[in-house]
Amino acid sequence: MAAAIASKPSGRVSSVFCRAAERQAAYDFVESEHVDEAAILESAVRACVERASEYPFVFVPLDGTSLSLADHARAKDFGSIGSRERGARGLKVVDAIAVSPSGVPVGLAAMRWWARGPKPTRHKRRRITEDKEPRYWLDAVARVTSAFADEARGPRVWFQVDREGDAEALLHALAQSGEWFTVRSNSERRLTTGDEHRTQRRRYLRAHLGRRKPIGYELLEVPAHDGHPSRLACLALRTARVVLKTRDKRSLRHKDLPVNVVWAREYRARSTRPSRSGRSSFRELDWLLLTNHPVDTLEDVRKVVFGYTQRWRVEDFHRAWKSGVCNVEDNQLRARAHVVRWATVLAAVAIRAERLKHLSRERPTEPATLEFSALEIEALILLKRHYRKRTETITDDVPDLETATRWVAELGGYTGKSSGGPPGAITIRRGLEYLRPAAEALELSRASGKKR
C-alpha cells in the first residue's frame, strides 16, 4: 500500500488504487478491527531510528497540528478543531520527526492522536495535567525517548519545541528525559533569586538578559513565509545560566528549574527577494530559547540557534502531508481509527518526499542508490533519455543524488532556475508518479521474459 501511495500520492483511497480488487483490499485493511495502527507507526519509527544511527545526535522537532475532516452530520467520532464556535471537525495530533545534524529529515519519530471532547465545564479547582491536552505532548516525548533508547548505539535526541509547548510540565519532563532540549519561551519567566523572603524582589528573564552584552552575532537566512519575502537577518546573541521559578499545578508548590538561556534578537534585516504581493514589512525575529545544551562558547550558542531553526522542517512536513504532496485531509473515511491508519501511511510518504528534497541539497554528490532502488535508477535513465534535450548526453552510469532528484522533478514539471529555486516536494512527488510505474513495468517486462 505504501509503495502504491508513493507512486500516486492522494488523500483518497479511491484515487490511489484504480483496480476494484486493490481498492477493496485497501478499504478492508484500513477499516479492519484487527489492524493495529500503532504497529504501522512503529515500523516507520524503527526505520527512522535505524537510519539515524549514523549520526551522533538528531534534532527532533515536536509540534502539534490538526486535520480538518468532513463530518457535516457530526456522526463520526471526530472532535472539534480550532475555535469551537466555528464548528470545524477533525482530529488533532502531536508529531515528531528526526532531522540530521545538517538539516536533512530522517523519518517519523512519533505521532500521538486524539479527538477533542465537548467543552469542559468550569470548576473552581484547576484540572491537573493528566486531564488536559498537554499530556499528549508528554506522551510524545516519552515515546521518542523510548524509541531511541531501545537502539544499542542510537544517536542522542535534541528536542526542538516552539512556544506552543512552553509549559511547566513539559519543561520538567524534557529535563528529566536525559536528552537535550530547546524550548522557545512563550511568556516572561520569573527567576529564582534566593532572597525573595528577605527583600520581596522579583527578577524576570528578559530583563536579566537585557543587561548583558551580546557575545556575538549570527546571520540567518529566513525563508519566505505568509506573503513576506525571504531575507537575511542579523541576530544578536545573548546567553545566561538561570534558575526558573515554576509551579507544579498538581501540588501548587514552586519548583526550581536550572536552564541555559539563549536570546537571539534581530536588529537588522534586508530582503533577499521581492514579495509577489509587494509587502515588505515583516516581524523581526525575537527568540528566547530555554535549553540544557551547553552554551559555554559562541559556537555552542550558534548550535542552539541552528537547532531551533530545524523546527521549520516539521512545518514543511505538515505542508507536504496535508496539502503539498499527500492531501491527507481529502480522505472521506468514516471513523477515527480508519483515518489514523491511512494518515500514518501517508505521513511516511510525505516525510520521504521531504527527505529526498533536502538530501539532494545537503549531500548532492552521494550516489542515487542512497534513496533509489536499482530498478528506479534504470527506469529514470530510460525516461531521461526519452525526454532529454538535444544537447544532453545520458550515460548508463549511476547519477548522483542531486542529478537524479532533478531528473525526477523534471518529470513532474520542474523547469530549472525559472522555477524559483531547487526542486521542491510537489514537483518531486509529481515526478515519482511517473517513475514508480515505469520501474514496475520494467520489472514485469523482465519477469515475463524469464518465463518465456
Image (cartoon, rainbow, N blue to C red):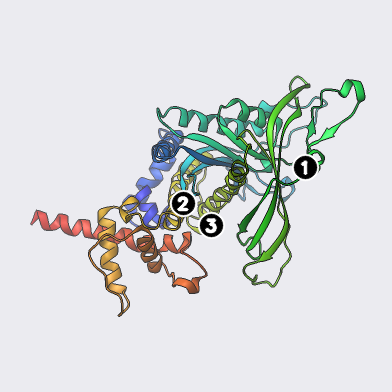
Task: Look at the picture and state if 40 lies above or below 324.
Answer: above
Circle 3 packing at 10 Å, graded few (<14), some (14-19), many (20+), is: some
Farthest residue, direction bottom: 390
- Determine whether, in the image, residue 394 is placed left or right of residue 212: left
In this rendering, which labeled residue sits more in front, label 2 or label 3?
2
Q: Position of residue 411 (x, y in %)?
A: 37, 68
The residue shown at (44%, 71%) is 416
Report, in whole angstroms, how far the alpha carbon at label 3 lies from the one at label 1: 44 Å
The earlier-in-sequence mark between 2 and 3 is 3
Q: Quadrant of residue 171?
A: top right
Which callout, 3 or 1, points at the residue further toward the start of the chain?
A: 1
What label does residue 279 carry, if any?
none
Q: Residue at x 50, y 67 (%)?
A: 421
Q: Which residue corresponds to mark 3? A: 323
- Residue at left offset 39%, top offset 53%: 6
Q: Residues within 10 Å of mark 2 (few under 14, many from 20)?
A: many
Q: Which element type, helix, strand or loop, lies under badge 2?
A: helix
Q: Is residue 175 left or right of residue 355?
A: right
Q: What residue sits right under mark 2 in the picture?
A: 350
- Number of numbered callouts drawn: 3
Pointer 1 local density, CA inside 10 Å: few below 14, some 14–19, many at least 20: few
Nearer to us: label 3 or label 1: 1
Q: Does residue 91 show up? A: no
Disc 1 residue type (three-letter): Arg
Q: Amino acid at mark 2?
A: Ala
The residue identified by callout 1 is: 212
Q: Nearer the viewer, residue 321 or 77?
A: 321
